[in-house]
Amino acid sequence: MAHRNQPLVTRRHGITVTSIQRTIDDLDGTIAPYLLRRAKRQAELKRVRLKGAEGTRSRSDLEEDFLALTHHLPSPETNVKIGRWEVDFLWREQDVVVETDCFTYHQGSVAFEDDHARELDLRQQGYVVLRFTDTQIKEEPARVVADVARALGRETG
């Protein structure tokens, strides 16, 4: 079913193609859920407003995993701009930033340098910056939660 006022098809470079919403609708139930979430995230990054995606707070499964781990802590802001940088999670009142990293998306010298420049800039602005890998989030969740709680001034137990 098409979103209100959104056509089912459009033309791109002279070729008739289905709209992004129609493509997402057609994929629903035919591919793995994580692939459907990825397609929806890509559409949203292109500023396409999708029906049924209004509640999404993150850009990746890793960010969703992190949010699920920290559900009992105060809710952070997600994907927030601080100066020239966008951070994954921000607890503004406590000046705590969390970055979640996966080797697949953070490999290469440019990503490596950008990550470290971001961290240095944020620390110089007074933020506590915590970085967690996908492996830490999946295999050491208690340690991750304890580290975040400690930075927020809360005890876990």
Image: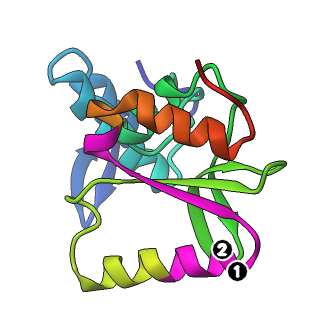
Dot 1 alpha-carbon crowd within 10 angstroms: few under 14, some 14 to 19, many 20 or more: few
Say whether residue 8 is magenta: no
Whether residue 6 is visible: no
Secondary element at tag 2: helix
Which amino acid type is marked by label 2? Answer: Arg
Magenta residues, as a range?
Answer: 117-136
Q: Nearer the viewer, residue 97 or 55?
A: 97
Say whether residue 120 is magenta: yes
On-image quarter of the C terminus: top right
Which colour style is shown? rainbow
Whole-percent x, y for residue 24 in the image: 31, 31
Q: CA distance from mark 2 to mark 1?
A: 4 Å
Dot 2 alpha-carbon crowd within 10 angstroms: few under 14, some 14 to 19, many 20 or more: some
User: Which residue is at a point 20% across and 58% down the rendered structure image?
Assistant: 104
> In the figure, is residue 110 to the left or right of 107?
right
Whole-percent x, y for residue 117 in the image: 50, 83
User: Which residue is at a point 55% across and 28% down the rendered structure image?
Assistant: 70
* Pointer 1 residue: 124
User: Which residue is at a point 58% across and 41% down the rendered structure image?
Assistant: 148
**Occupied quadrant, residue 77:** top right
* Pointer 2 residue: 123
Whole-percent x, y for residue 31 in the image: 15, 24
**Occupied quadrant, residue 125:** bottom right
Pointer 2 and pointer 1: residues touching (CB < 8 Å)?
Answer: yes
Label of residue 37 in the image: none
Whole-percent x, y for residue 115 in the image: 43, 74
**Occupied quadrant, residue 32:** top left
Which amino acid type is marked by label 1? Answer: Gln
On-image quarter of the N terminus: top left
